[in-house]
Image: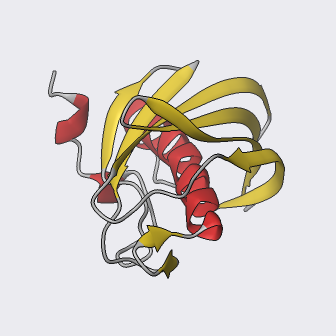
Amino acid sequence: MKSWSDIPIGEILLQQPPFRFVDRLEFFSMEETRVSFTVGDTMMMEGDRLSAAGLMEHMAQASAARIGYYSRFELNIPVEIGFIGQIRKFSYTRLPVKGERLETSVLLRQEVFRISLCDILVSCNGEVIASASLKTALKDD
């Protein structure tokens, strides 16, 4: 099997640059998915820092990468459009600067039908800098 990081991120995420906030899939299991993102010249910057909204978008795309990988490589179906249903308990200790690499864990807490509840932890240089609980839903046909 190929390394997780060999999977082109465009195969599991519908977002395209400059609005893509995940670079690589690092690990997948049904309970936990890990992704990474190096902050660069992208939308949602405030000077040399990723904005709080950009950090939230990164979390949402990390959750989408989990669903996208599962759909594409486990179920062998096309990646579907998803929506953020709710963001709870969003907090951050600092905003990452351009060039810093984010390592993000998506921990699945509950999945019912096409709705997922995940806890997200964003780390940078070994320090957790942000967290949130996200509820996402896949678009109905």
Q: Nearer the viewer, residue 77 or 89?
A: 89
Task: Work out which quarter of the rendered image holds the C terminus and state it.
Answer: bottom right
Lateral position of residue 101 relative to residue 33, left or right: left
What residue is rendered at 46% in x and 69% in y?
Answer: 49
What residue is rendered at 70% in x and 34% in y?
Answer: 118
Visible in this render: residue 75?
Answer: no
What residue is rendered at 46% in x and 80% in y?
Answer: 43
Counting labels gives 0
What residue is rendered at 54% in x and 58% in y?
Answer: 95
Q: Position of residue 61 (x, y in %)?
A: 53, 55
Quadrant position of residue 135: top right
Vertical order, 60 against 128 (above or below) = below
Quadrant position of residue 10: bottom left
Vertical order, 52 against 35 (above or below) = below
Q: Nearer the viewer, residue 33 or 97?
A: 97
Quadrant position of residue 15: bottom left
Q: Nearer the viewer, residue 15 or 40?
A: 40
Lateral position of residue 23 relative to residue 77, left or right: left
Q: Position of residue 88 (x, y in %)?
A: 85, 46
